[in-house]
Image (cartoon, grey):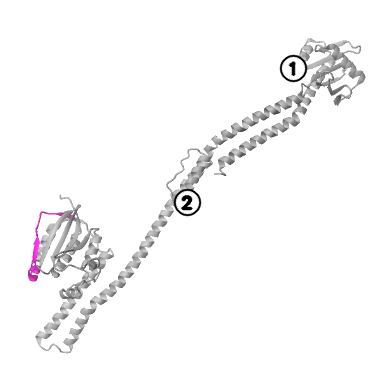
Amino acid sequence: MRESIRRQFTVIFVSLMAGTILLCWFVNNTFLERYYIRNKQDVLLSVYGNLQQAVSKDMLDSDSFDLMMQRNCEKYNLSMLVVDANSRTVKISGNDSDFMRNQLLQHVFRGSGEESEIMEETERYTVWRVADQQTGMEYIEIWGILNNQDFFLIRTALEGIQDSVRIANRFLAYVGIAAAIASGIIIWLVSRRITRPILQLTDISQRMSHLDFTARYEGKTRNEISLLGENINKLSDTLEKTISELKTANNELTRDIQKKTKIDEMRREFLANVSHELKTPIALIQGYAEGLQEGMGEDPESRQYYCDVIVDEAARMNEMVKKLLTLNQLEFGSEPVTMERFDIMALLENYLQSARILLEQNGIRLSFRPGPPLYVWGDEFMAEEVFTNYFTNAVHYCRKEKRIVITVGRQDGHARICVFNTGEPIPEEALPHLWEKFYKVDKARTREYGGSGVGLSIVKAVMEAMNQKYGVSNREDGVVFWFELELAEET
């Protein structure tokens, strides 16, 4: 990152440090020499004050004064000379007394020269900066007269302050450069502790922008960044929960819209199919009833025939309405599904026992081998409804050898019940539509035995309500319908 906080932080810190060092260098170069000279001047004035105090107390010859003056001269590198009016030495500090006496006499009688720079001057003393022509060194001197009329001279060398300033500034530059480089490296490394959590927060926010809320800030420090990380974690949880609720609501809304659309389509389809299916029996009932009113059936046999037709058509309409109500309850989930454990073998045996008369009337041979109890899970009433529809269809469409085969097998933890009947196979293109309401492959045949066209639709609704599989397939000599139920352990 070209504009990373880490780089900016390092550049700013190094720039501030370099600027501080440059400022120190400028201050040293500009003011250090003046400060040094001013300090020397203050030292000379302080020693002069001690002299005046000793004179006023008549302690100029005391041992304590000598000790104090010796200590000051050694500490500040001073040379001092005190002479009386007759040029006799009263006090001296330094080895070259003659040179000091000559210097003092020259100052007293000649005053300042071109080589001197007066720094401070009063009636009692003069402070100036003077250069020694022989040695080339500069000195600061204070000379004058004491209260007892003795003359004094105190001087100190400036010790090449310009060279000292240059050396100090050069040393400061070296140290500053090294310190700036070292500090830059240190701050570059240390700043990772600051930028790492920021980069982590950046990554978390980027993942949040892509609706990934699994990332969490795990910083352990208790600073502003950690507080920001905790707030981002809370924000992530809130966003995830809110988006989840929105998606759930949106999914429910979509399902409701789809369900409403499906219900509207089913209602239109139901009305169209019902009106079509009821049209014929109603017309027959109406026609034969009108015939009776008009006296078309004069003899008892004719009237009985008319009445039988009306009763048959009314019964067919009643059966259709019952099945449609059952189908409607199953499709809309209003028919409760009671999952219970029951013996499918016992159910099949009981039903087939009651259906033997129907088989004999139609000349159909039944093939069914009863076995030991086989327990399954499901709604026993609905399972019987499915088998009844399969068996009834098999009886009505049984041809050729007129044989029905019932088998029960085990497959992947389920019991598969198959109902096979000999006859003509169902056209392949019609197989997917068998489960649709009012769909009839052979309408004439269906009408002949009074079928309503909703039996297999009921099978579909029942099996889907129990979440089990069902189906149909053609054989060479007939058709087989099947359904499955989950096996249950025997107890």
Which image quarter is the N terminus in? top right
Q: Is residue 432 magenta?
A: no
Pick out the residue farthest to the front. Answer: 476
Dividing the picture into quadrants, the one containing residue 378 is bottom left
Q: Is 178 situated left or right of 246 in this image?
A: right
In this rendering, the label closer to the viewer, 2 or 1? 2
As shown in the figure, which amino acid type bears the numbered disc 1?
Lys
Q: Is residue 267 left or right of residue 345?
A: right
Image vertical order of residue 397 relative to residue 60, above or below: below
Q: Position of residue 294 (x, y in %)?
A: 17, 89
The type of residue carrying mark 2 is Ser
* Horizontal side, residue 347 vs residue 44: left or right: left
Asked if residue 326 shows in the view, the reply is no
Quadrant in the rendering for residue 278: bottom left
Q: CA distance from mark 2 to mark 1?
A: 74 Å
Instruction: Please state which of residues 372 and 337 is positioned toward the viewer in this rendering.
Output: 372
Q: Which residues are magenta?
A: 356-376
Residue 15, given in percent of the width and then of the height, sits at 64, 37
Crowd tier of the residue under label 1, counting other residues whose Cα lies within 10 Å: few below 14, some 14–19, many 20 or above: few
* Residue drawn where x is 44% and y is 45% of the image: 215
Location of residue 440 in the rendering, given as x and y in whole percent from the top left corner: 21, 71
- 285 left or right, relative to 219: left
Q: Which residue in the structure is indicated by mark 2?
A: 209
Q: Quadrant location of residue 362?
A: bottom left
Is disc 2 in contact with disc 1, using a CB cutoff of under 8 Å? no
Residue 342: % across, % down: 16, 56
| Residue hosting label 1 | 75
